[in-house]
Amino acid sequence: MAALRIGSRGSQLALWQANHIASLLKANGHHVEIEIIRTTGDKIADIALSQVGTKGMFTKEIEEALAEGRVHLAVHSLKDLPTEVTPGFELAAITRREDPRDVLLSRDHRGLNQLPQGARVGTSSLRRQAQLRALRPDLEIHPLRGNVDTRLRKLESGEFDAIILAAAGLRRLGRTELVREFIPAEIMCPAAGQGALGIEVREGDGETRQHLLFLDDAAARSATTCERALLHRLGGGCQVPIGALAEVRGEHLHLTAVVAHPDGSQVLREAQSDTNSENLAASVAKALLARGAEAILQELYGNPVAAPQQP
């Protein structure tokens, strides 16, 4: 079987993900190596993501390695990938999804409602911050960057009363000991693509794509394609609080989405179902824009957002 080289970031979670895919490929008869690639996002770990404004800051250097032929495939957290895959590349597989929800971790408190007034909560996600401020405006929310171990250390040292992270990463690393609550998507809508891995290859590399076909999960691809289509229609990135979660329910996709003002003063929610993911994304985006998301996004982007045409 073919020898395959995986490009990956060097964080603990990224390497878990790369090694997970490597083990599945090895079980299928491939010889696999992993090349660690440092990305722009890794080099500015002390700056809040919402202040950076660079799309693809966790993928650019890895895509360069792909383009040069140094690696055959790249394993990404799908939520880190821009909604438009860079020309010259394609998503060969989207893996079976881990739990997409956010979780609250704490040493002393059992959940979001049990946090005392004025509790210090750590998260650098604007999406989480906005929804959290709407739910509990009394909380003190502070930036939290770094790898999972760093964030957990800050919690354990007493720097925070609670922190909010993605369930998927904690489960993959076996670090769920301080999880106190899995927050329902109806309360805190997760990021588009959260919990899924995207495997990227050079466009036209049919041989590598063929080797990866067995990793592609139809339900995960359908759901995350819908979420990413919604995010694309709203022009979303790390600077804008947008959440999206699609779930396969029988023959339909059900999409729940949120657009929020960063200060939590407005949280617009919309949920619809359809059999076509693109139509569903367009319909939910149109409904959100009409109900006030356009004004929020215009304020944040500084330019009007064009309402999508109904397909």
Image (cartoon, rainbow, N blue to C red):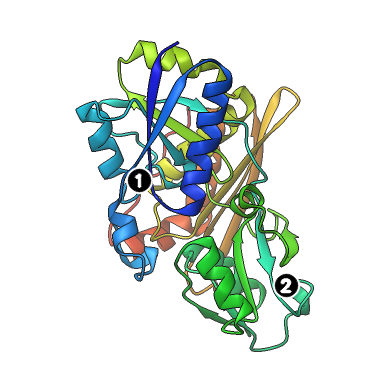
Query: Viewer-proximal residue, 36 or 295?
Result: 36
Query: Viewer-proximal residue, 139 or 171?
Result: 171
Q: Which label sits on residue 145?
A: none
Image coordinates of residue 263 in percent, x first then y, are 49, 74
Callout 2 crowding tier (Cα within 10 Å): few <14, some 14–19, many ≥20: many
What's the residue type where badge 2 is placed? Leu
Of all residues, the one furthest to the bottom in this rendering is 118
Q: Is residue 14 above or below residue 118?
A: above
Q: Is residue 204 above or below residue 19?
A: above
**Image depth: mark 2 or mark 1 in front:** 2
Residue 215 left/right relative to 300: right
Please name the residue shown 45% across and 21% down the image: 31
Where, by quadrant of the figure, is residue 53 drawn? bottom left
Where, by quadrant of the figure, is residue 86 drawn? top left
What residue does disc 2 label? 112
Residue 253 left/right relative to 33: right
- Dot 2 lies on which element? helix
What residue does disc 1 label? 306
Quarter of the image where the N terminus is located = top left
